[in-house]
Every structure is written in structure tokens, then in C-alpha cells.
Amino acid sequence: MKTSYRIFITLTLISILSGGLLSALNNVTEPRIKQHRVRALKAAISEVLPAYDYYEEISKGPVTLYVGKKKPDGETVGIATRLIGSGFQGKISIMVGIKPDFKQLSGFKVLEQVETPGLGTKIVVDPSNKDNPFWFPEQFKGLTFLPAITVIKNIKPSKPAEVQAISGATISSKAVVSILNSQLPEIQTIYKAKVR
């Protein structure tokens, strides 16, 4: 009985100390993680929008729009928003910039993804393309998205709403386009409802 009692006390003390240590560590790291996320968000907004002086936030439910403005008259230069959808392996999170006329994208950046290493991860950077490792995301800058973006294989895009798929990662390429095609109309509706 004494042995089992000692084991119980020892395990209880280890659990209490471990829990306390994890809690203290969380209290130290949580503010830093939040600060890092805010910096990463601001950097992504700056990357997908044309030059702006400040931005205003418009929120509706889980959707937040970042409306880039120019001084002195507050002219809108673009709208940035985060879109999340399903990829081949899991969720893909992207930040897109949209021109104020809601016809073209001004920028595109993959924030998070868990696609297949060496294939689907080429939606971010393609190390096998020595001339331009960022060719896939760069296709979206200035891309027309109305009526819908289409994915083409093995040839260069010839129309304003076409995107070339990544060879060997067509599913990831189509997933990105599907996220854009399904969510951009909703973003436009939210923006127009709030601006009026």
C-alpha cells in the first residue's frame, strides 16, 4: 500500500508542476505570438494591396476586410481579405488584394498551407523553377476573376481569367482557384453593403 501511495503522490506532484510550468510558459509566449500574428497580418496586407496610407476594417461575422486608403481624401486603393478553404491535405489560408472595381486581384499571398511537400507546397514557392520560384502566386496579380477563374494545364494562360496549374499538383492549384471563385462574390457583397 505504501508503494502505490508514493507513486500516486509522485505522479500528482509531477502533474501539478508540469501544469504550472505549461501555464507559466503560455503566459509568457501568448502575447508574443499575438504580436507576431499582427505583424504578419500587416505585412500580408501591405504585400497584396497597392501603396496605401492607412486601412479601415470592415467586419461581418468571421470575415474581415482591410480597405486600403490614400490621404488626404481617403480614396480606396484596394481591399484585402483572408480566405480559407480546403486543399489536398488540409486547410489553405490566403490573403488576397482586390482592386476597388472588383474585377481584378491586386495581390495574392499564401499565409498557411499543409499541402504535399515538394508538390502542393509549390503554391507558395517552386524551388524547381530556377528562373522564377514564385511564378504560381505571381499569376494572380492583375488576374481578372469575373465571371470565374479557370485552371489550365501545361500551357501558358492566354485569357485574363486563366491560371496555369502546377505540374504534379493540379489538385492544390484547383483548390486555390476554388477558394477564390467561391468566396470572392461574398466579399464583394459584404463590401458593397458596408460602403453604401
Image (cartoon, rainbow, N blue to C red):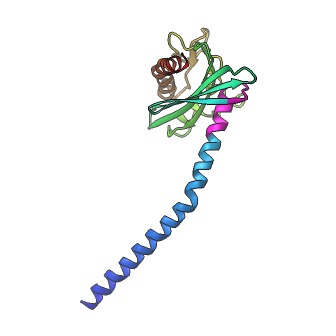
- Residue occupying the point 52% across, 66% down: 24
Residue 48 drawn at (x, y percent): 65, 28
**Is any atom of residue 133 visible in this view?**
no
Q: Which residues are magenta?
A: 41-54
Question: Residue 2's image quarter?
Answer: bottom left
Is residue 89 placed above or below 151 in the rendered structure? below
Is residue 140 placed above or below 84 in the rendered structure? above
Is 160 placed left or right of 192 in the picture? right
Question: Residue 107's image quarter?
Answer: top right
Is residue 145 placed above or below 71 in the rendered structure? above
Residue 42 drawn at (x, y percent): 65, 37
- Residue occupying the point 40% across, 79% down: 13
Of all residues, the one furthest to the left in this rendering is 1
- Residue occupying the point 69% across, 30% down: 54
Q: Camera-side residue: 52 or 71?
A: 71
Is 40 placed left or right of 151 in the picture? right
Q: Camera-side residue: 39 or 144?
A: 39
Residue 158 drawn at (x, y percent): 61, 9
